[in-house]
Image: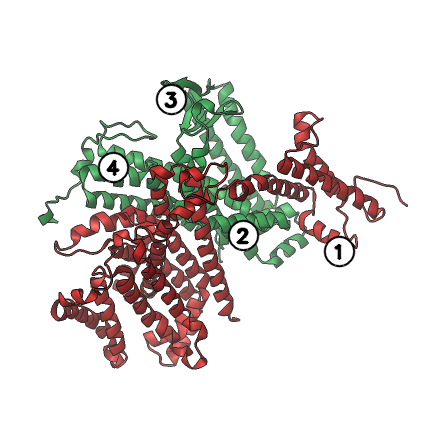
Amino acid sequence: MENRGITFGYGFLSQESSFDVQFSLIEYDGSHSYFRAYLVGLLNTILVSVIGIVFATIIGVVVGIARLSNNYLIERTAAIYVEFFRNIPLLLQIFFWYFAALRALPLPEKAEPIFGVFFLTIKGFFVPAFVWNNLNIFIYSIIAAIISIVFVRLYSKKKQENQGIQTPVLSISIGLLIILPLLSFLLGGVSASIEIPVIEQLSQTSFTYIGGLKLPPELISLALALSLYTATFIAECVRAGVQGVNKGQKEAAASIGLTPNQVLKLVVMPQALRIIIPPTTNQYLNLTKNSSLAAAIAYPDLVLVFAGTALMQTGRAIEIVSITMLTYLTLSITISIFMNWYNKKIAIKEK
Amino acid sequence: MSKLNFLSPDKNNLYTYLYSGISLFSLSILIVFLNSFFSLDLTRFLPGTISYFLPLIIGFIGLHLIRIEYSGIRFLDIINKNINTNKFNAFLSLLIIFAVIKSMPPLLSWFIIDANFAGDSKDACSGSGACWAYIKTWFNRFMYGMYPNAEQWRINLSFIALAFLGGVGFFASEKFKKYLTLYYVVVYPVIAFLFIFFFISGGPIFFDFSYGIIAAVISIVIGFFIPSKFKMYYFLIIPITIYILLKYVFFYEELIELGKIQAFEWVETGAWGGLSLTFIVSFFCLIFCFPVGLFLSLGRRSDLPIIKYISIGFIEFWRGVPLITVLFMSSVMFPMFLPEDMFIDKLVRVIIAISLFEAAYVAEVIRGGLQALPRGQYDAAKSLGMGYWKMHILVILPQALKLVIPGIANTFLALVKDTPLIFVVGLLEIVGMLNLAKTNPEWLGFAMEGYVFASIVFFIICYAMSKYSYNLEQKYKTER
């Protein structure tokens, strides 16, 4: 290293970065430091991972259950989806959505509004945004609702263990989640207005939408590809989990007079979750790591912003690549610690 | 004749329900079919929304009417059991059937009817459908990358020969079957390597690498004649010694000259590409990642703390970082740690990086198999007086590997699907070539065709691999 004239040190992180990033969650421009650029990339990575994990879980669970359906058509459709999407490289899927599918969308001036307020254009997805007054009170009310739901759950669990009486936790939770924020609107002085994107002409041929929220096409195609790809694996995990529950368990539960819903909730799901959670954790980890493919379509994630642009500008390969790898390691370990904790919580408690 | 109750069809009046139900169901399908294939709207006289949902309502009533349990008609029973068990299922079935009928015409017209097959320039593609002429023109590049056209027979010949040599196992007679493992683990990779080295490359690229392989093979062969007491040290010291001897003492410059066969033009690895590069990278990574992963998994279960923690650290590190950063590391960071006069080819670096990365995953899969074996197997093997290696080779690994065939196959599939990532270091396999072709000014605007083509290619490869692994699993399944 010495004879190549390379020095080692992390001092460059506080220097001015002087490059711009297309899409960032926090305020950022060229006058900010490299560390700030790192944060921008990290937040973008986390954003796309969270979106991907949420949608992959939803699609995966639905498709996994559809694979178990006794309806031949549904089962086949789900199977074809799984076989098709998991046998095509993720990178190819990202390219497909970004370069082929989303490029077929109309220009901003020709876009047809969906429900009058959403605009799906080649420049991105424009959705209305909320403009809040007293947003903090609203957030407090949601936190209060979540805390009270936790207490309701604990109470109902205790009640079931002691007296065998079930409380309708789900409907109480949904009620709490609706009522408390609603109260904050009525009493706390919270108000929200919706800002609808409006088309504006920038120049002779260039149009864009002002106001509202803009989701760039890179984010959409990346989230779409990640969730569709990972969902196939989660679907297989769910299917294996539900099939892994012994048939006798269901019959035994039915024979002591539980309703089909209760059988699913109290007997099948707790056992199936034990099989489902560990492989699904792996899929979440994979999704987070796969989000680094964003660099291929110029979505400004950690790899593109930091290991790409920042590396090219500073030339500090060792520092930057090591920081990037450490960050991903930390992300992976965080997710796996959390899922291990959850896994332990639902595992069989052997007496 | 009992009273007709259309809300709950039953077996009395079976045929009344059957005929009315089937005719309503067929009518709904006919409406959708005519609408999508011939743009004929039978229900034009109705207001928009109703005419839109009418087929769904008619079909739903039709399916409701034929939902008769134990009708005695076999065909009807099969339909009822498979797509028509209750209202919700009937509704979903209808949606799927309509969606399939609706999506047929646009797909067919894009793929076949309006597509252009002939021609060799962009002007040939005027229709609204796919431009397969684009694929046809670029086919050579998608398969071989920038490899010179005149030399492509070398790639073809190598692949055919390797496929043939790989298929030897199927034709081996009973007498030679026991040598097959040795053949596939030791001999075949060397042959494959020599083919790629002499035929496809024709140059000095892989030389450093080939010393390593020659050293490994020679040491394994000699290893059979060494008393087992010294084997451990032997396998650590001898290969390194042979490697150093080969590289610095015996043939330094001469072999490099020998390696170039004058008849072949040297094609540098930067020009390799397309699907053949996908195969080459996947093939070598498959060969290398398996033994490395095997040793890592054994190391992780070792009793020696140093080996154990080194293995754990190694595995967890590679599993925690994305492949793209590993490739970044191999391309920008790794060369800085090398001596100045040493140069390792890009392709070799990529193969090493991917192999190590996948080896960590293979190690975890094999560990799962090792953990699944009951303790009794270890105890029984030890009670027979077997040592560590003998126990693992003869008793533990055959059972453990059999258990984890699906997992290993999944890892290998992931490996094949990860190969497009080598675009990071500038190697263009099929997806990379697509992106290159897409930006060619004479062929702008055909991204969709290219990606569909590559998707089909990858789907065929991966689906065949997964089916093969399923067969393998069935073949080695033993009752436990």
Residues under labels 2 and 3: Cα distance?
49 Å
User: Residue at the spot x=23%, y=70% of the render?
Assistant: B214
Image location of residue A342, percent across then percent down: 44, 47
Residue B305 seen in render: no
User: Residue at the spot x=38%, y=21% of the render?
Assistant: A205
Going from the N terminus, do you reach mark 4 or mark 2 first? Answer: 2
Please give the label number shown on residue B355.
Answer: none
Q: Nearer the viewer, mark 3 or mark 1?
A: 3
Instruction: Say whether marks 4 and 1 touch (CB < 8 Å).
Output: no
| Amino acid type assigned to the residue bearing label 3 in the image | Ser
| Amino acid type assigned to the residue bearing label 1 in the image | Arg
List the residue tagged with mark 3. Answer: A206
In the depicted structure, whether residue A59 falls above or below residue A252: above
Disc 1 chain ID: B
Q: Colour of chain A?
A: green
Residues under labels 3 and 1: Cα distance?
64 Å
List the residue tagged with mark 1. Answer: B74
Q: Is residue B277 left or right of residue B337?
A: right
List the residue tagged with mark 2. Answer: A239
Residues under labels 4 and 2: Cα distance?
42 Å
List the residue tagged with mark 4. Answer: A309
Whether discs 3 and 4 lie on one chain: the answer is yes
| Amino acid type assigned to the residue bearing label 2 in the image | Arg
Give the mark count: 4
Q: Nearer the viewer, residue A33 or B427?
A: B427
Q: Nearer the viewer, mark 3 or mark 4?
A: 3
Location of the N terminus of chain B by quadrant is top right
Q: Nearer the viewer, mark 2 or mark 3?
A: 3
Disc 4 chain ID: A
Whether discs 3 and 1 lie on one chain: the answer is no
Query: Label 2 crowding class (10 Å Cα cut-off): few <14, some 14-19, many 20+?
Result: many
User: Residue at the spot x=43%, y=60% of the render?
Assistant: B409
